[in-house]
Image (cartoon, grey):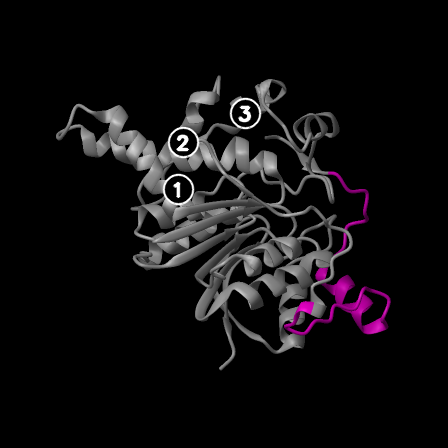
Amino acid sequence: MAFTFNFDIPLQTEETNDKENKDGNAKDVDLKCSDASATDPTKTKNAIEHEPLLDPLSHIENWVPEIITVGALPPLLCLNESVFEKTAPEREDSDEILAKTLNQNSDLITGVYEGGLKIWECTYDLLEYIDDEGETFTGKRVLDLGCGAGLLGILALKRGAIKVDFQDYNSTVIEQLTVPNVFLNCEDDDETEEQNSSPLSKRKALNTSHKLLDHCGFFSGDWNSFLTLMRNKTSSPKYDIIFTSETIYNTDYYSSLHSVFCGLLAEDGIVYLATKSHYFGVGGGLHLFEKFVEQNKVFQTKYLKDVKQGLKRHVVSLTFKK
């Protein structure tokens, strides 16, 4: 979707942000890895777990899939963004964000819509890194945090993850984009398997949908309430891998993001974060988030991939300090 950020804020550079931090004029970001630190007054939307229909694709009209290929990775199917935009008025929209994003021509309306309907550049950077490393996810528990289209979690499913949970701020994103994309890729795998085996494709597809739901979870809401919801589940999950792409654009959200990492990452787990160096007009970026992480002395950060074309972008990992 051809949107822009809905902010009227002077452009800042990393040097400006550094100066503001030294002078004490900018917001001081401080956190300890505890429940008390999970404060984020600007971003509140109660978390809910979504129970998708067994065949969500049958309830979506005028959807057109596109094939996304990255290196040797398995092809990923995704609802086409342009078609999605043109058919937005026809879709169910529990968050009432589709009309707002179109009317305001914006990819980001703070506290209302957090950009989940667009596939951002850094998601492709992280997919390319996974391709370069040849990483598989057999036996892993994975969280796709701020998932949007869900490509990272879908790839983990295709490569053997035993559990993948998808989380996004907006329920409309989960219901109208993430869930259909997951089932679209599942259906594609099922049809491939069926070509030379059995004519009972519809029955097999239904069975596959049941199995898929056993391996997936879908959640919407802000990160603080998502963390609370997950901790209150009968079996509190710990993830071997947390994927998160383009989620550190706003420093107001750092405490809740850090708390999710603290609360849901397994002791030997890893966070893969894909991000731009700086988000002009919004204020966040990797430099500020690194300082934030260093202040709290919980995680160690490692640079994995740098992209210098256009706006500088990076893939980094976070692991618990030993």
Q: Earlier in the sequence, mark 2 or mark 3?
A: 2
Give the number of the disc on residue 54.
2
Where on the picture, by quarter, is residue 64? top left
Amino acid on which disc 1 is placed: Leu
Where is residue 81 shown, x and y percent of the image? Answer: 53, 29
Drawn side of residue 269 relative to residue 221, left or right: left
In the rendered structure, does residue 156 fall within the stretch colored magenta? Answer: no
Q: Earlier in the sequence, mark 1 or mark 3?
A: 3
The reply to whether the C-beta atoms of the residues labelled 1 and 3 are less than 8 Å apart is: no
Where on the picture, by quarter, is residue 53? top left
In the rendered structure, does residue 13 fall within the stretch colored magenta? Answer: yes
Q: Nearer the viewer, mark 2 or mark 3?
A: 2
Residue at 49 percent across and 63 percent down: it is: 271
Q: Earlier in the sequence, mark 2 or mark 1?
A: 2
Q: Which residue position holds label 3?
A: 84
Q: CA distance from mark 1 to mark 3?
A: 24 Å
Where is residue 164 shown, x and y percent of the image? Answer: 42, 50
Give the number of the disc on residue 213.
1
In the image, residue 129 sits, relative to residue 298, either above or below, namely above
Task: Determine the secondary structure under disc 2.
Answer: loop
Residues shaded magenta: 6-35
Where is residue 140 shown, x and y percent of the image? Answer: 36, 59
Amino acid on which disc 3 is placed: Phe
- The secondary structure making up most of the magenta span is loop
Question: Which residue is nearer to you in this view: 217 or 301?
Answer: 217
Q: CA distance from mark 2 to mark 1?
A: 8 Å
> Which image quarter is the N terminus in?
top right
Q: CA distance from mark 2 to mark 3?
A: 21 Å
